[in-house]
Image: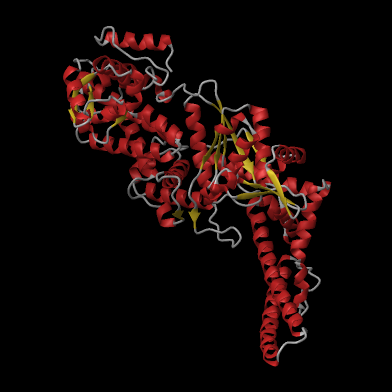
C-alpha cells in the first residue's frame, strides 16, 4: 500500500531514532507509512517469520488487537498459523524465547497458545505525535481505494413529505460511509434516489387542487404539502372503509335473495344486514365529512343521508389513478405540477442536508428510470429464461436458487413495472455512466429481501459487477407513521435540541460570554446530540423514538464529544506554545502510564478506520472517540501543562494537541462540526 519512496522516508525516520536497517515486511495489505500499527505489524511479521518459519503473509492477518493493555498491543493466536505436529502453547513459549530483542517492542510474552507483543512507548511517541501534528486533518487516511470509484445511495426520502427522524438513519450512515471511503482514497459518488413517482403523486396533485393554498406553498412548501397529503390520505382511508362496508351490505342483500335458504338462515342474514347497513351509513358519513374537509366544494357536502354505495367506486382513489395515468402518458400540465412539487422538495431537503454536512453529486429517482430502460430489463430477464407468467403477470422464482428469496413479481398483468424492475434498470444505467467498482445501498433492514432479490437478479443476468453490490442495512426508528400524521420532523428535532443546548450553555455565564456565536454553536452541539445518539449503537438495532433520549446530557453523548474537543482547544489556547515547539518536543519526558495509554489509543486511529471500512459501522468510530475522550479526561489530573517547566509542558501539550486533532478528525468523519468554545 505504501510506495517505495514512502517506505524509504519511514526507514530514514527510524534511522534518526537510532534504528538502523529496520527489518520490515512490506506487503500491499500494510500501510507502513500511514498507520503506526501497520509499521509494528511489518516488524513483528518479519521477525516472527524468521523465528518460526511461518510465512509473513500468514502472520500479518493473524495479528489482532487486544481488549486490555495488560495483554499487549497486538496478540497472535498460534493455531491461526496452521503449524502441524506441535502444541500451540509449546510453540508460543518456544518462539517467545527465540524472539530477538528489538527497538520496536518493550516485551514479548506468551500466555497459553497466544503470543503477546508490547510496543515500546517511547518509539510510539516519536512516531505518532509528529505524524499527527504533521498530517493534521489527513492523519488516518489511506490509499487502499486509490483509482477506485464507489457509489453510495442513501437517504432517499419521498418527495413532498417532510424529512423525519426515520430518514436520519440512512442519511447519517450514508454520509459517514461516503466520507470514510473518501478518506481511504476512493472516488465517491453520492446519490439520493428519491421516491418521486407513483400513484401517491396523483393523490397529492388532486388534493392540492382542492385543498392546497398557494401562499402556504410558497411560505412553507414541504410542511404544507405534508398537511395536504395527510388530509387526502385520511379521506382516502375513510372512503375505502365506507366502500368496503357498502359492498358488505350488497353481499348480504344478494345472499337474502338466493333461493332455498331456511327461515333461520334468513333471520340471521336480516339481523346481519341491519347491523351492516348501520355501520355502512356511519362510515359513509365519516367519509363524506373527510371528503368535504378535503374539498370545500364537494358536490355532496350538504347531503344529510349519503348513500354508502357512492363510495364503492372509491372516487378519490379513482381520480388519483387517473391523474397519475396522465403523468405516465406525458401530460404537460400534470407533469408541471409534479415537477414543481419535486423541485420544491429538493430545495428544502438540500437545506436540511447542508445542516448535517451532507451533499450529493446526483439527485436521481424512480422517475428518472426510462420506460425503455425498464423494458430492456424485462427483455433481458426473458432472454435469460428467468421469467414465468401467472395470469398475465411476470414473476421470477428465486426458490430454485435460494429458498429464502421466494418469488418476486416483476411486471403486473397490466404491464406496470415494479420496484425490482426499476432498481435493476437504475443499476444498469449507473454502471454504464460511472463504471463503479462498488455500489453501496444504505437501506433499512425491512428491505433485506428486496435487495437480496435484486442482487441475485444481477448475478443471474450475468453482470460481472453484481459481486460489487453491498447492502448496508439498519434498524428502524419506531413510533412514527406518516399516514397518521404523527411524524416528528427532523427540523423540529434539530430546533428543539438547539434550544435545549442553548439553555445549558447559558448556565455558565462566564464561558457563554466568550462564545462569539452562541446560536450557531448551540445548533452544532444540538446536531451532535441527535446524530451521536443514533450512531452509537449497532446500526441493525431498532430504537424507539424518545425525546428524553434525544435531549439527554448524561453518559456518552454528542455534547460530551463537543465538550471534550472544546476543552482540548482551551488547553492549547492557554499554553501559547507554537506548532514548531510541539514538533521539537522531548517525548522522553512523558513517562506516566496514562500518557502511554493515550499514545497507544492515538496510534489505533488508522486501524479504527480500516475496521469501520470492513464492517460499515459508524459505531466503530463513535466507540473509539468515547474511549479516547475518557482517557484524555483521566489525563487532566495527572498531566498538567500549566505551571510546568517549558520542556515538560511542551511534551504534554504535544500529546494533548495530537488527541485534539484525532478527536476532530473522527468527529468530522461522522458528520459533526467540532466547536472550539461552548
Q: Is residue 21 above or below residue 646?
A: above
The answer to which quarter of the image holds residue 583 is top left
In what quadrant of the picture does the C terminus appear? top left
Tell which of 56 and 129 is nearer to you: 56
The answer to which quarter of the image holds residue 556 is top left
Residue 652 image offset from top left, x and y in percent: 25, 25
Q: Is residue 572 visible?
A: no
Q: Is residue 623 above or below residue 436?
A: below
Q: Is residue 587 left or right of residue 271?
A: left
Instruction: Determine the residue positioned at 55% across, 24% down.
Output: 148
Q: Determine the residue located farthest toward the front in the rendered image.
A: 85
Tell which of 481 and 442 is nearer to you: 442
Instruction: Determine the residue positioned at 56% across, 59% down.
Output: 481
Q: Is residue 587 above or below residue 311?
A: above
Tell which of 282 and 246 is nearer to you: 246
Residue 170 image offset from top left, x and y in percent: 53, 44
Residue 677 image offset from top left, x and y in percent: 38, 37
Q: Is residue 358 above or below residue 483?
A: above
Instruction: Determine the residue positioned at 70% across, 78% down.
Output: 280
Residue 35 image offset from top left, x and y in percent: 37, 22
Amino acid at each position: 500500500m505504501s510506495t517505495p519512496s514512502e517506505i524509504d522516508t519511514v526507514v530514514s525516520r527510524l534511522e534518526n531514532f537510532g534504528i538502523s536497517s529496520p527489518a520490515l515486511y512490506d506487503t500491499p495489505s500494510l500501510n507502513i507509512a500511514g498507520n503506526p500499527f501497520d509499521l509494528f505489524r511489518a516488524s513483528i511479521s518479519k521477525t516472527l517469520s524468521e523465528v518460526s518459519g511461518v510465512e509473513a503473509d500468514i502472520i500479518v492477518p493473524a495479528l489482532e488487537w487486544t481488549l486490555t493493555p495488560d495483554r499487549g498491543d497486538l496478540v497472535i493466536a498460534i493455531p491461526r498459523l496452521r503449524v502441524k505436529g506441535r502444541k500451540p502453547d509449546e510453540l508460543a513459549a518456544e518462539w517467545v524465547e527465540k524472539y530477538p530483542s528489538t527497538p520496536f517492542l518493550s516485551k514479548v510474552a506468551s500466555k497459553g497458545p497466544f503470543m503477546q507483543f508490547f510496543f515500546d512507548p517511547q518509539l510510539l511517541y516519536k512516531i505518532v505525535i509528529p505524524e499527527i501534528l504533521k498530517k493534521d486533518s489527513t492523519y488516518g487516511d489511506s490509499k487502499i481505494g486509490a483509482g477506485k470509484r464507489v457509489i453510495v445511495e442513501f437517504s432517499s426520502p419521498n418527495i413532498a413529505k417532510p424529512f423525519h427522524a426515520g430518514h436520519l438513519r440512512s442519511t447519517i450512515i450514508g454520509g459517514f460511509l461516503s466520507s470514510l471511503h473518501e478518506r481511504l482514497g476512493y472516488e465517491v459518488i453520492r446519490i439520493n434516489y428519491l421516491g418521486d413517482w407513483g400513484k401517491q403523486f396523483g393523490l397529492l396533485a388532486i388534493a392540492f387542487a382542492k385543498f392546497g393554498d398557494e401562499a402556504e406553498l410558497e411560505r412553507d412548501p414541504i410542511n404544507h404539502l405534508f398537511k395536504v397529503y395527510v388530509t387526502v390520505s385520511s379521506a382516502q382511508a375513510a372512503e375505502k372503509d365506507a366502500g368496503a362496508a357498502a359492498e358488505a351490505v350488497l353481499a348480504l342483500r344478494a345472499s337474502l335473495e338466493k333461493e332455498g335458504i331456511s327461515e333461520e338462515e334468513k333471520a340471521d342474514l336480516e339481523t346481519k344486514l341491519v347491523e351492516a347497513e348501520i355501520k355502512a351509513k356511519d362510515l359513509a358519513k365519516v367519509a363524506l365529512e373527510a371528503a368535504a374537509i378535503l374539498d370545500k366544494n364537494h358536490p355532496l357536502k350538504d347531503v344529510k343521508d349519503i348513500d354508502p354505495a357512492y363510495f364503492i367506486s372509491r372516487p378519490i382513489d379513482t381520480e388519483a389513478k387517473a391523474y397519475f395515468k396522465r403523468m405516465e402518458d406525458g401530460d404537460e400540465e400534470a407533469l408541471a405540477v409534479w415537477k414543481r412539487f419535486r423541485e420544491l422538495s429538493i430545495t428544502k431537503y438540500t437545506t436540511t442536508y447542508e445542516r448535517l454536512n451532507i451533499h450529493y453529486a446526483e439527485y436521481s429517482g424512480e422517475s428518472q428510470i426510462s420506460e425503455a430502460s425498464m423494458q430492456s430489463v424485462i427483455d433481458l430477464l426473458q432472454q435469460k429464461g428467468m421469467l414465468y407468467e401467472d395470469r398475465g403477470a411476470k414473476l421470477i422464482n428465486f426458490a430454485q436458487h435460494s429458498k429464502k428469496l421466494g418469488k418476486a413479481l416483476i411486471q403486473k398483468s397490466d404491464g406496470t413495472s415494479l420496484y425490482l424492475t426499476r432498481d435493476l434498470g437504475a443499476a444498469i444505467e449507473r454502471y454504464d455512466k460511472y463504471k463503479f467498482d462498488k455500489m453501496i445501498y444504505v437501506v433499512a433492514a425491512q428491505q433485506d429481501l428486496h435487495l437480496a432479490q435484486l442482487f441475485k437478479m444481477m448475478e443471474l443476468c450475468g453482470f460481472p459487477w453484481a459481486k460489487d453490490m453491498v447492502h448496508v442495512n439498519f434498524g428502524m426508528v419506531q413510533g412514527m407513521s406518516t399516514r397518521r400524521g404523527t411524524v416528528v420532523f427532523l427540523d423540529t428535532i434539530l430546533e428543539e435540541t438547539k434550544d435545549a443546548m442553548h439553555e445549558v450553555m447559558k448556565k455558565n455565564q462566564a464561558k457563554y460570554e466568550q462564545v462569539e456565536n452562541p446560536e450557531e454553536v448551540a445548533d452544532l452541539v444540538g446536531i451532535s446530540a441527535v446524530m451521536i445518539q443514533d450512531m452509537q449503537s449497532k446500526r441493525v438495532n431498532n430504537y424507539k423514538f424518545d425525546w428524553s433520549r434525544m435531549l439527554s446530557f448524561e453518559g456518552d453523548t454528542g455534547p460530551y464529544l463537543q465538550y471534550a474537543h472544546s476543552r482540548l482547544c482551551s488547553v492549547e489556547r492557554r499554553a501559547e506554545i507554537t506548532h514548531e515547539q510541539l514538533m521539537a518536543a522531548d517525548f522522553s519526558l512523558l513517562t506516566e502510564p496514562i500518557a502511554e495509554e493515550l499514545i497507544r489509543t492515538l496510534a489505533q486511529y488508522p486501524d479504527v478506520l480500516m475496521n469501520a471500512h470492513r464492517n460499515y459501522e459508524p459505531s466503530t468510530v463513535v466507540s473509539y472517540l468515547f474511549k479516547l475522550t475518557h482517557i484524555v479526561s483521566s489525563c487532566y489530573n495527572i498531566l498538567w501543562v500549566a505551571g510546568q517547566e517549558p520542556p515538560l509542558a511542551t511534551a504534554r501539550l504535544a500529546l494533548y494537541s495530537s488527541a485534539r486533532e484525532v478527536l476532530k478528525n473522527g468527529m468530522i468523519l461522522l458528520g459533526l462540526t467540532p466547536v472550539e468554545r461552548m
